[in-house]
Amino acid sequence: MKKFISSIVLLLVLAFPLLQMPKAYSAELTAPEKTLTFLTDVVKLDMTKYTVTLVSNWVDYPPHWGGLAEEDVRYNLDGVDESKLEVTCKFRENMLYSCSLDVLKGSPIFVQPSTNILDEAKSLLERYHAYSGASYPQEMCNMLDKVDVTKEMTVTSGNIKLTTSSQDVQHDPAMEAIIHTYFEWMYTVNGVDAPQNVLRVTFENGIFKFFRDDWNLFKIGSTSAISQEEAINLARNAAEDYKLQIYLGNNTLTDVEFNLVEKPVTAELFMYPRETLTVYPFWRIEVYFDKCYYSAYGIQVGIWADTKQIEYCKSLSGLGGPIAEEDPIEPSTEQSLTSENGTVSSMNMYIITATAIIALVGASLLIYFRKIRKTTKKPETIMPEEST
C-alpha cells in the first residue's frame, strides 16, 4: 500500500509542471489546434456558435529569419446570426505570433460583448499573459492605466514605449467611417527604438482585429552610438563626394553638379538588422540640395552608429521633398526626368511596366504553388457544440 501511495505522489509531482505549463507551449498540440485555443482563450470568440473549417495549413522558411520555421493556419468560421469570419494565425517555431480576424459578414460572436475598448485591450493582454507564460504582457497591460484612447499618446516604462492612436478610415463615402484604434509596444534601449521588436493590438470599431507579438524576435547587438552631430558631419562628407548621375533619353548617364544646403537636415537613430535576427544602432541622415536637379532633391546616407561605417549613400528622387523650388532646367521630351534612384522616363515606362507585371505574375504563381505544395491538411469541418 505504501508503495502504491508513493507511486501516486511521484506521478503527481512529475505531472505538476505540465499542469502549470502555459497553453502556448503545449507541445502535443498542432498549430491548427493552438489557433482554436488562442481564439477561445485569448480572443474570447464563442466557438460553440461557429462551424469551423480549416482552409489551409502550410509551412515556410523565410530567409530573413535564418531558417526558423513559419507556419500559416487559416480558418473559415460560419456562425449563427449570419456571422462569418476568416481567421489567419501565424506561428514561428511552433509559437503563435500573429492573429488577424476579418469579418466577412455580420459581427463576431464573443463570449462577452465588447464594452470599453481600453478594458478590452487590458483583458486581452491579461489573457495572453496566461496563454503565453511570458512576463512582459503584464507590464504592458499596466501601462494602459496611463492611456486616454481619445488621444494619440506615447507612454514609456523602462525599455517599453507604448504608442496609441485612433484613425477614421473612409473606404466608401456612402458608408460610415471605420475607426481603427492601435496599441503598439516597442522595445527601446538607451532611448533608441527597436521597431523590429514590438507587440501590436488593433481594434476596428471597438472589435478585435489584429494581434502580433515580435517582442523577443531580434537580439540587441550593440547599444553604443555616435552623436547626431558627428553622424551629420560624416553624412555631409559622404554626400559631398557623391556622384549624381542622370539618365538622358539616349540611355547615357550624365554627371550633374549640385550644391548642398546647411539646413534643413533630417536625422533618425534607430535599431536596424546587420546580422540575422540581430540589430544595431543605425543613423539615417538626409541632406538636401539648394534646388531640384531634374527629380533629385537630396542625398540619404546610412551610417552604423556603433562603428561609424557608411552603409550606403544614395540620391533622393521623386515628387516632393523639403525643397519646393522647381528645377530651372527644362528637359526636352526626349530626356529622362530621373536620377539613378528615381522615377523612369516616359520613353521607357511601357517597357519597364510590362516587365514589372510579368515579374509580379510569375512571383505570385510561384508563391501560390509553393503554398499548395506545403498544405499539410485537407480542409476539415468542426461543427458547433449543441447548446445545453
Image (cartoon, rainbow, N blue to C red):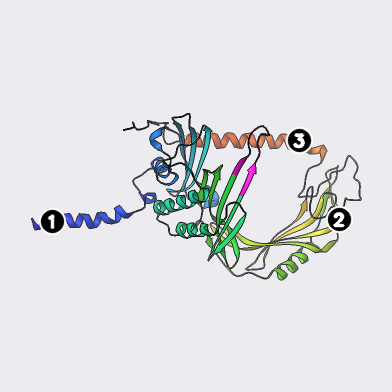
- Give the quadrant of residue 234: bottom right
Q: Amino acid at mark 1?
A: Ile
Please say whether residue 100 is visible from this viewpoint: yes
Depth check: give the residue in front, 241 or 128.
Answer: 128
Left or right: where 362 falls relative to 373: right
Residue 17, position in %: x, y?
29, 56
What is the C-alpha distance between the residues marked 3 and 1?
81 Å
Residue found at the very far left of the displayed protein: 1
| SS state under label 1 | helix
* Magenta-tinted stretch: 166-179
State which tag comes first along the sequence, 3 or 1: 1
Q: Amino acid at mark 2?
A: Lys
The total of numbered circles placed on residues is 3
Other-residue count near label 3 (Cα within 10 Å), few / some / many at <14 / 14–19 / ≥20: few
Q: Does residue 70 appear in the picture of this structure?
A: no
Q: Which mark is drawn over residue 5?
A: 1
Quadrant where the C terminus is found in the figure:
top left
Q: Residues within 10 Å of mark 2 (few under 14, many from 20)?
A: many
CB within 8 Å, label 2 to label 1: no
298 sits left or right of 360 in the view: right
Give the x, y percent position of residue 97.
Answer: 48, 49
Pointer 1 local density, CA inside 10 Å: few below 14, some 14–19, many at least 20: few
Q: Residue at x 77, y 57 (%)?
A: 299
Q: Which residue in the structure is indicated by mark 2?
A: 291
The secondary element bearing badge 3 is classed as helix
Q: Nearer the viewer, residue 104 or 262?
A: 104
Is 167 magenta? The answer is: yes
Q: Look at the picture and state if 329 lies above or below 232.
A: above
Identify the secondary structure beneath mark 2: strand
Is 180 drawn above or below residue 276 in the view shown?
A: above
- Pick the quarter of the image with the N terminus: bottom left
